[in-house]
Amino acid sequence: MTTSDPTIKLDQFLKLIGIVPTGGQAKLMIQQGDVLVNGMIETRRGRKLVSGDRVTVRGQTFEVELNNS
C-alpha cells in the first residue's frame, strides 16, 4: 500500500487485509476486544497504526507495512 500518510486507522487496516468486509464489522470486532495491537487489547477503531505495529485478530498476527512513497 502506498500512502502519503505514515499511518492507517485500525478499522481501515482490518478491511485492507480482508479480515472484515465493512467498517461496521471492524468497529464491532474492535469494540468487543477481539483485536490486539502490539499484544494489548485495543478498543479504539481510530487507533493510528504505523509501520512495524503488529495486529492480532482471530489467532493471526499481521505486521503493518506502509510504503510512504
Image (tube, helix red, strand yellow):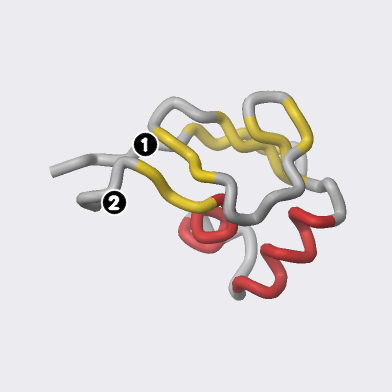
Q: What residue is at 47 percent from the left and 59 percent from the top?
A: 16
State the residue in front, 17 or 69.
Answer: 69
Against 18, residue 69 (above or below) is above
State the residue in front, 9 or 39.
Answer: 9
Instruction: Tell me the residue that label 2 is attached to.
Output: 1
Among the 4 quarters of the image, the one containing residue 14: bottom right
**Which corner quadrant holds the C terminus?**
top left
Return the disc, 2 or 1, that comes first in the chain's sequence: 2
Q: What residue is at 61 percent from the left and 71 percent from the top?
A: 23
State if disc 1 and disc 2 touch (CB < 8 Å).
yes
SS at circle 2: loop
* Amino acid type assigned to the residue bearing label 1 in the image: Glu
Residue lying farthest left? 69
Instruction: Tell me the residue that label 1 is attached to.
Output: 65
Disc 2/disc 1 C-alpha distance (Å): 8 Å
- Left or right: residue 51 compared with residue 45: left
- Left or right: residue 20 compared with residue 18: right
Residue lying farthest right? 32
User: x, y (%) of residue 43?
Assistant: 76, 48
* Amino acid type assigned to the residue bearing label 2 in the image: Met
SS at circle 1: loop
User: x, y (%) of residue 31?
Assistant: 81, 56
Q: What residue is at 78 percent from the left and 65 percent from the top?
A: 28
Against 64, residue 5 (above or below) is below
User: What label does residue 54 carry, if any?
Assistant: none
Among the 4 quarters of the image, the one containing residue 15: bottom right
- Left or right: residue 64 compared with residue 65: right
Tell me the crowding category of disc 2: few under 14, some 14 to 19, or many 20 or more residues within 10 angstroms, Cα based. Answer: few
Q: What residue is at 24 percent from the left and 52 percent from the top?
A: 3
